[in-house]
Each structure stands twice: as structure tokens, then as C-alpha cells.
Image (spheres, grey):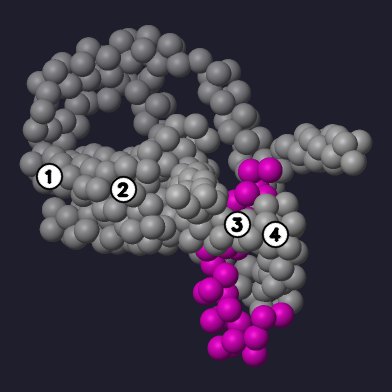
Amino acid sequence: MNARVVLALVLVALGLWTAASFLPALIWATILAVALWPLYLVFAKRFLGGPSGAAAFVFTVLVALILMTPISLAVYEVAQQSDLLADWLKRAGDGGIAVPGWVARLPIAAESMEQWWRANLSDPKAATAWLKTINADNISNLFRTFGGQLLHRLFLLFFSLLTLFVLLRSGHSAARRFLETCDRLFGDAGEGLVEKLIEATRATVNGTVLVALGEGAVIGIGYFVAGVPNALTFLIFTTAFAMLPFGAWLAFTVAAIVTISNGGSGVAGMCVFVWGTIVMLAGDHFVWPTLVSGSARLPFLLAFVGIFGGLAAFGLMGLFVGPVIMAALLAIWREWIFRSAPQA
């Protein structure tokens, strides 16, 4: 018996080591499958007569489109602006660049910014000397590294979607096998633990999506009121990036800068930034933990520690893994220790 246990542990360790590079993609696919399973069942029954391989494929394609659309728009916008950046650098090196009018409209540090611009960019010699500090080889290497990382991330995304399709297609059998395994390993308490983990996963994903939609909509109202150029595009970017750490902060900061640089007032740009800051602080630090804690039946403090502690420990994945770990610990504490304690 001991030899069988040792052999099983060795094989599990070897399997994890072999699949180490794919574990993040597998975890993301599992999180999506657990969170989207009720929605998938409704979709499959309403449009394709019930769960099947075809229903799982169509649903996975829809998920891929939802995930890829904001990324594709962002890449397209960056590509559109790259020519402008190259032209700006060329003009700066050849004849310098005059201080643009929007610098004077900055509500904070406008004079200091104008002085720096005149000293470093308006004078052709100063601009050439400043641009020489930017090593072209380093920039080239940076873009090559970025391209390689992008291809790697796209491959992992494809693998996650493939795993999601397999999990949706075989959802019932996979769940049954998993519950049987937990029941054999941990007894009746194992099934209760699995239920807690599923609740925590769905609550975290649903809370993240709902809070991101709410933050994007509220900040988007500020875009239209302040007269941000392409306000609808910025609203879409802010909503999508609100699901990422500091993503929405980047979106509304860029929106504030674009507002000032395209003829808007400095006060309008500053109001966009302040409004976005207020919404994000309230949403991320109060609404989101409260929503997750209520849906996952976690105390607020445990939900808060799980979300932000998980983010610090595991990166982006920790936003979802952290609350699940806290829910598992709470379930073990309640179900395995207190309920199994002998009654006096």
C-alpha cells in the first residue's frame, strides 16, 4: 500500500512537472468552464437542442470572439499610431518640435512642462541629443521580445480555448469523475468542498465581469460629459481593461491626455482622471470584494485578502484563485473540523 502511494505521488509530481508550462492555460480554461457552465447549458438547450459537441464548439467560438475583440481593437489602434510616432521622432530629430498648445492647458505643472519641452524638443540640437539617448537597438530588441511573447500568449490562449471546448463537451462525465475521486479521497466532506470551490469561482468571475461593466459604464458617462474624442471607443477599452489590474487606470489616463491634446480644456482632462480614480477606488476596494464575499458566502475580510493577496502571489490568475483558496480554507474549517468534533 505504501509503495502504491509513493508511486502515485511520484507520477503526479512528474505529470505536473511535464505540464508546468501549460498549467496557467489549463487553470484559466477550468475557471472559464466552471463560471460559464450554467450559461452554456442555457445556450445549448435554447439554440442547439442541448449540450453536445457542436454546442460546445459554437459556445467556445463565441467566448473566443468576446475575448479577442478588445485585444484586436487595442492592437489595431497601436498599429495606427505607430506611423505618427515614427513621424514625430523624425521631425524632432530634423528640426525640433514646437511646444503644442495643449501643454499650456495642463491644469498642473504646465509651466514646468513647457520649459522642459523647449529645452529638450524645440531646439533641434537638444532634440537630437535627447533622442540619441534612445538606443535603436534596444527598441528593436524590445519589439522582437514583445513579438515573441505575443505569439506565446496567443498559443496559450488557443490552448485554453481548446481545453475549454473539451471541458464543455465532456462536462457531465468530467464532473462526475471528479466528484467520485473527491469522495474516495476525502469522504462525504469532499463533495461539500467541491461545491464551495465552484461557488467561489463563479462568484469571483461574475463579480469581476459585473464590476468591470459597471466601472466602464460610469467612467464612460464621464467621457461623454467631458467631451473626450472617440468616447465610445474609450468606453469599450475601459470596460474590457477594467478586468485587468490597472487596465482601466491606463485607459482613462490616456483618455484624459487625449482630451487635453485634442483641444479640450485642462480642467476637462483633469476631471476625467479624477472621476476615473474615484470610480475605480470605490469599485475595486469596496463594491468588488463585497459582491464576491456575498455571492461566495465569504466574510468580507477573507474575500478582500483572497482577491488582493492572490493578485500579489499569483498575478492576474490570483484574482480568481485567491478567493477559491480562501473558500476552501473556510469550508475545511467549518465542515471538517467543527462538524466532525465530538459533541459534549
Q: In the visual, does 186 lie left or right of 63?
A: right
Residue 204 image position (x, y, % from top left): 43, 55
Labels 2, 3: front one: 3
Task: Please tell me which residue is depicted at 35% across the width and 23% down the height of the picture.
Answer: 92
1 and 2 marks in contact (CB < 8 Å): no
Q: Which residue is mark 2?
A: 300
Q: Which residue is mark 3?
A: 189
The amino acid at mark 4 is Asp
Lower position in the chain sequence, tag 2 or tag 3: 3
Label 2, label 3: how far apart the Cα atoms are: 24 Å
Label 2 residue SS: helix
Q: Which residue is mark 4?
A: 183
Mark 4, other Cα within 10 Å: few <14 / some 14–19 / many ≥20: some
Which residue is nearer to you in this view: 198 or 113? 198
Q: Residue furthest front?
A: 344
Labels 1, 2: front one: 2
Lower position in the chain sequence, tag 4 or tag 1: 4
220 is higher (above) or lower (below) than 109: below
Which residue is nearer to you in this view: 8 or 221? 8
Which residue is nearer to you in this view: 45 or 234? 45
Lower position in the chain sequence, tag 4 or tag 2: 4
Place residue 251 in its image quadrant: top left
Residue 269 image position (x, y, % from top left): 15, 43
Label 1, label 2: how far apart the Cα atoms are: 31 Å
Q: Answer whether residue 212 is visible to the viewer in this image.
A: no
The amino acid at mark 1 is Cys
Label 3 residue SS: helix
Label 4 residue SS: helix
Q: Which residue is mark 1?
A: 271
Residue 216 image position (x, y, % from top left): 29, 57
